[in-house]
Amino acid sequence: MFVDKVVRLGSVLVTSIFVTRYLGPELFGQLNYASAFVGMFFALTAMGLDEILIRDLVRRPDRRNQLMGTAAGIKFGGAVILFVTVVVLALVKHMDRTTLIMVLLIAAAEFLKPFVVVEQYFYSQVKGRTAAQVNIVQVLLASCFRLVLVFIHAPLVWFAWSYIVEVSIGVAGYLVAYQRDGSSWRNWRFSKPVALYLLGQSWPLIIYGLALYVQAKVDQVMIGDILRKSMGEAAANAEVGQYSAALKMIEALGFVPGIVVASLAPAITRARSQDRKLYQDRLVNQYRLMFILFLAVSVPLYFVAEPAMVLLFGEKFRVAGYLLSLFAIRLFFTNMGVAKTSFITNESLFKYSLVTSVVGAVLNITMNYLLIPTYQSIGAIWAMIGSFFVSIFLVDLFFKEARPNFGWMMKGIFTFWKIRNVS
């Protein structure tokens, strides 16, 4: 699974360099505007079911076909809602023909994703290796397809088609792997009672997912919408392209904290049931480690961001290099937010987590409206930083259950040099 993440990161990075250089800021921005516009609603297809499905497949293996068939049916219904939503909003926004076609193509790819419930089946059977193999094949073939598009000088719309190609490869791979495991998707059955049960379990996660996707994607959409009125179509798309190029680079660095937190999670969970002081010390140590990782990556990145972006993407993306240097600050909030999931999970504060995500999304949208007209992409970066500061740190002060964690985070940050082994 680690190899899967590394291959994905490497393939996406290499492909992005070729695609970004080929399209240039304007067309790259137009493509990313379309993908971000649809991406805000990806939670409607996921429907918050993945972890719940894994759990129930472990608990009730005898109801596998019913659980998987029902989950796939719910996800298909969510894909229909997503498609209708983006079509209506796209028409209301009077998108140009090319952007509208790309939005429709990217949204259409969601109709294939219900079959990816097979991935949760493999995880429930502790066969993550199989899922990782499918994912590796998917990303390699999809990357090859995009590179071919670059080499044949394909028009912009074909890069939207690549989303359908990528999902199709993944679906085909999972169905073949599922069949080799001795099963068939044709045996899946939809059950209304099971659907009501799953939706009853997942509805908070649907809202949570929507809030997270909106917070992650809305800035690209709002940059395009707001600046289009003052700067024109081409300049607004170019601004989105510069911002998106920097954003993709900073997102590529986000997998390291996730791996670290996942590796430390068992020790923290054991400490939670054994000794409260040990649990606290391990959480503080984790926050110290996340802050050290932030310093180790962000400080060098701040100084090399601009020349690195010019080297990788060309002189046209020098602005993206400056934006990337500012994005280095985001790594602080990303690292601390990922580490904070250990506290939320162990304390079962999922409703609190829902509140923080909604607050973060609303604040991000509000600050974007205020800052983008004057400061353009830089305003979007500060809006994101401000929303993360409130949702990750300040909201803790208003919840009694989360207040101790605020103190632990502050202690970890301001005593980061005291990191030690806590056994």
Image (tube, rainbow, N blue to C red):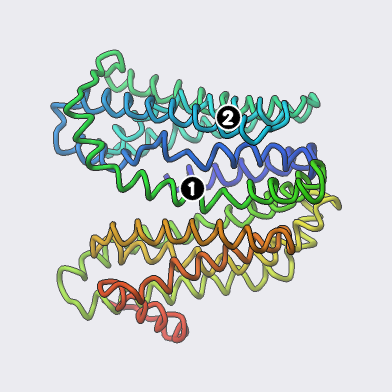
Which residue is depicted at the point 23% across and 65% down? Answer: 347
Which callout, 1 or 2, points at the residue further toward the start of the chain? 2
Question: Is residue 141 shown to the viewer in this render?
Answer: no
Left or right side of 229 for 191: left
Which residue is depicted at the point 23% across and 29% down? Answer: 195
Left or right side of 63 for 27: right
Q: Amino acid at mark 2?
A: Ile
Question: Quick one: SS at disc 1?
Answer: helix
Image height of 177 relative to 329, above or below: above
Which residue is depicted at the point 57% across and 46% down? Answer: 9
Residue reaching furthest right?
315
Q: Where is residue 147 shown, x and y percent of the image? A: 71, 31
Q: Quadrant of the C terminus?
A: bottom left
Q: Disc 1 designates what residue?
A: 213
Q: Residues within 10 Å of mark 2 (few under 14, many from 20)?
A: many
* Quarter holding residue 128: top left
